[in-house]
Image (cartoon, helix red, strand yellow):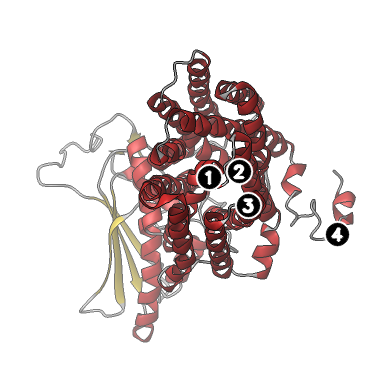
Amino acid sequence: MSTLQDQSRPKGSLFSADGVAAPLKHGVFRRIWLASLLSNLGLMINGVGAAWAMTQMTSSADMVALVQTALMLPIMLLSLAAGAIADMYDRRIVGLAALSLGLVGAVTLAVLAFLHLITPHSLLFFCFMVGSGMALFGPAWQASVSEQVPAETLPAAVALNGISYNIARSFGPALGGIIVAAAGAEAAFICNVSLYIPLLVVLYLWQRTLEPSRLPPERLRRAVVSGVRYIAHSPSIRIVLSRTLVTGIAGGSVLALLPLVARDLLGGTAQTYGVMLGCFGMGGVLGALNISTVRDRWSSEISIRGCALTMGAAIIVLAISRSPWLTGAALIVAGTSWMVSVTLFNIGVQLATPRWVAGRALAAYQAAIAGGVAVGSWLWGHVANVTGVEGSLIIAGVTMLASPLLAIWLRMPSTDGVNIDATDPLAEPEVNLAITSRSGPIVVEVEYRVAQDRAREFHDVMQKVQATRKRNGAYGWSISRDLADPELWTERYHCPTWLDYLRQRNRATQSERELHQHAIGFHLGPEPIRIRRMLERPVGSVRWKDDTPDRGGSDVISLPGSANSGV
């Protein structure tokens, strides 16, 4: 597509730089997006088959609601590990392996249903297996979106992924209802199996450009810990995840109880359930198509509040309605509000997270939304057994209406900023001691000389520096002031090993580098700040031969560089 053609499109059109369809100009994204649309369509058809099969096997509301729990719970349980794997290994290979796992579960479910051997518990188990495949696939797929489109179209790409899911939700359930009514649940399971294939093929053919890492990948356990630590020391991400969890719990009532709404409140069949799910999905498409307008006109907090109030009212209407037309309209409104909310949460996480931990942050987001839906499905199913479907939905709607009160303590951060990775790597620090990558702990001390009248200002900046050190891998951080020389300040922190220290200093984003430079700017005098990097040694651990590498392994590290080539 030529530059002239691009410029001829008016700003705000679908394919302009800020248009929701702009990412489709990029071939890799377009192919994966279309294939994922088919895959999502299969999952929706599979969900209709599973939910309706459960209603045919049992009249228990909590067992019906557990179908959604079985599909969503793996995302909550496996997301952090899945995110770590997505950050550690080739995301294309991870996606292929995850889809293969889901395909095995889908094939087994279809075979058992065809042979009439399926039971409520086996249905839940293989739904859990399909959900596990999607839990592993999600972080790798979402984290790779930034590799498929330019940064300026990333929000539109996130919205398009939501549109893909909701186009499938709009037509998949209705199609699933027709398939189930015509040929039974086993036909829906078989259809899901066939729609896995295009995405597997597209991912297999994707020639992903790998960026070689300067450092070896982390081990899984440490990678998970690094992800948790990053989130724990990132206030904006913690807020988004907390609000996402609450929205998922309250909003999960819709998907969990919709089969019972169709059967008990509307007196319908599988087709009715499919049409009602389609209405919810249509609302989701409307929400995703208008996400750019919402972001331009209102702040994240105002948008999330509006969505919560609108969806809460729609859930209450859903509870009291006995008309398919009114219920369908309420579901369109609820779907629109739901999609705007979850897309804003998703964009907030993606734009606030550097690439090295993107998979883990997105996994945490998925865990929050899926965990909320899973817990909510279980909760509202049990409430429905006590109060009935109508009472359970009314309580859920009131909960959603009250959720904006969270802004008193957890106000949504802006989603406008982009956390850009630093482009220039730091020079390696000077090492004159024979050590290995596993040598540690490493102690780093940074000495600043600061004018006394700027002490408070410097201390405030260093509190922000503390957060960047900790979320990138440091621990035991402290800042101290010399009693005899009040201008002298010493920053001190630890890293578990030498390799962890190298990772920590190379993870800083461009904005974090600028913050560090701001702190260095307080330093007085012609001499640069002084940096000491020391190997902490317990009693009796020091080797007496100078040529013996310290602490295990054969990979001796002796890297040239300046002693002051970065903190």
Marks 2,1: beta carbons within 8 A: yes
Q: Which tag is nearer the camera, tag 1 or tag 3?
A: 3
**Residue behind mark 1:** 258
Q: Amino acid at mark 1?
A: Leu
Q: Residue at x 75, y 55 (%)?
A: 19
**Residue behind mark 3:** 323
Question: Label 1 crowding class (10 Å Cα cut-off): few <14, some 14-19, many 20+?
Answer: many
Which numbered disc, 2 or 1, marks the residue that appears first in the sequence?
1
Which numbered disc, 3 or 4, marks the residue that appears first in the sequence?
4
Residue 154 position, x and y percent, is: 65, 51
Q: Amino acid at mark 4?
A: Pro
Seen from the viewer's position, the closer of residues 329 and 221 is 329
Query: Which numbered tag is attached to residue 277?
Result: 2
Marks 3,2: beta carbons within 8 A: no
Count every numbered label the image shows and give the total.
4
Q: Residue at x 44, y 48 (%)?
A: 364
